[in-house]
Amino acid sequence: MCCDSDYVAGNKSQDSGIAEMEELPVPHNIKISNITCDSFKISWEMDSKSKDRITHYFIDLNKKENKNSNKFKHKDVPTKLVAKAVPLPMTVRGHWFLSPRTEYTVAVQTASKQVDGDYVVSEWSEIIEFCTADYSKVHLTQLLEKAEVIAGRMLKFAVFYRNQHKEYFDYVREHHGNAMQPSVKDNSGSHGSPISGKLEGIFFSCSTEFNTGKPPQDSPYGRYRFEIAAEKLFNPNTNLYFGDFYCMYTAYHYVILVIAPVGSPGDEFCKQRLPQLNSKDNKFLTCTEEDGVLVYHHAQDVILEVIYTDPVDLSLGTVAEITGHQLMSLSTANAKKDPSCKTCNISVGR
């Protein structure tokens, strides 16, 4: 973790070399601002008494405990920042401990460094809670560039498809007037992805078998498949966005793309948060025109997960049972990203 000031590793206030001294002002009314996925600004108020004696600030930063957390993880790792006293607000940024979309607690002490190198410190402030932000477009562009490296050559395809159980399609016909409805994306993929738990859409695939040029007959999501001509979902009236790049402790990688009808709520959501791709020229999914006909290609070496942000009527395609197997091990539902993979991680959290 670093600040706009220099810093050194600190110890707990009860450790040797640090003494309690009430004369130093205790920080209060702490404010956190300018929060990003790996940085924040912090400020507070102090009584003027002995203010001129302050040489350093101690900032104790910890991940907020939750019922599902590993109580032993990071237990012995110091998370205290000792920073030279600088004008407030002070920026805390660029530390391995800060992850996107994560709840933290923070408390502050004022300190005065003595000639012998020891510190006298104030009492701790109250504890404040805050949550870091999602990846910004800058971070997503870094992920996009890493994904481009391994995308591979482009293969022609003609249909998007969606596998589900028979009961899903029966429900759509009976309760939604034959139209598949967008639902909120789960938390699979990168922890900092701005679409997880927020973007509403319908998942489709477009991968083809190398030898047949057609969709594979196996699926992890159900034995019934809805197929729709590619031009019904992806055409000059839609925008294409990059959403995520991840793996699940496997050799193969996933790229999430979003297709949104121009001007739709999904399009507005993505325009503010995701890098937009040129539909005719990118490394993952293209729509070009040849002799007056739309032609489609997808990347061979990554598995594309395509989110379409509007309802899709079943009458626009066909539903049929697949002849292959239901490979549950390939499901990405709420799948956690491998934080150690050098191919698909960037340096600002996971």
Image (cartoon, grey):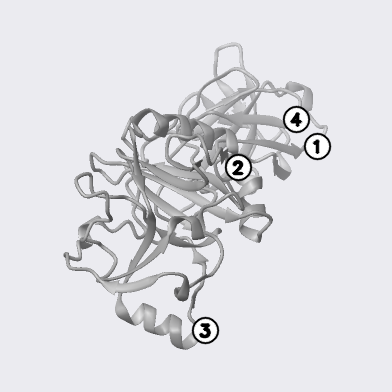
Distance from Cα at disc 4 to Cα at disc 3: 58 Å
User: Could you say which quadrant of the image residue 159 lies in?
Assistant: bottom left
Tell which tag, 4 or 3, sits nearer the viewer. 3
Quick one: label 4 or label 3, which is nearer the N terminus?
4
Residue 190 visible, this orientation: no
Residue 88 bears which disc, if any? Answer: 4
Distance from Cα at disc 1 to Cα at disc 4: 14 Å
Is the Cβ of the residue at disc 1 closer than 8 Å to that at disc 3?
no
Local crowd at mark 3 within 10 Å, few (<14), some, or many (≥20)? few
- Give the residue displayed 50% in from the left and 60% down from the top: 232
**Spot occupied by residue 284 in the image (x, y as percentages of width and height):** 42, 39
Location of mark 2 (residue): 107
Q: Amino acid at mark 1?
A: Asp
Local crowd at mark 2 within 10 Å, few (<14), some, or many (≥20)? some
**Spot occupied by residue 162 in the image (x, y as percentages of width and height):** 36, 64
Quick one: label 1 or label 4, which is nearer the N terminus?
1
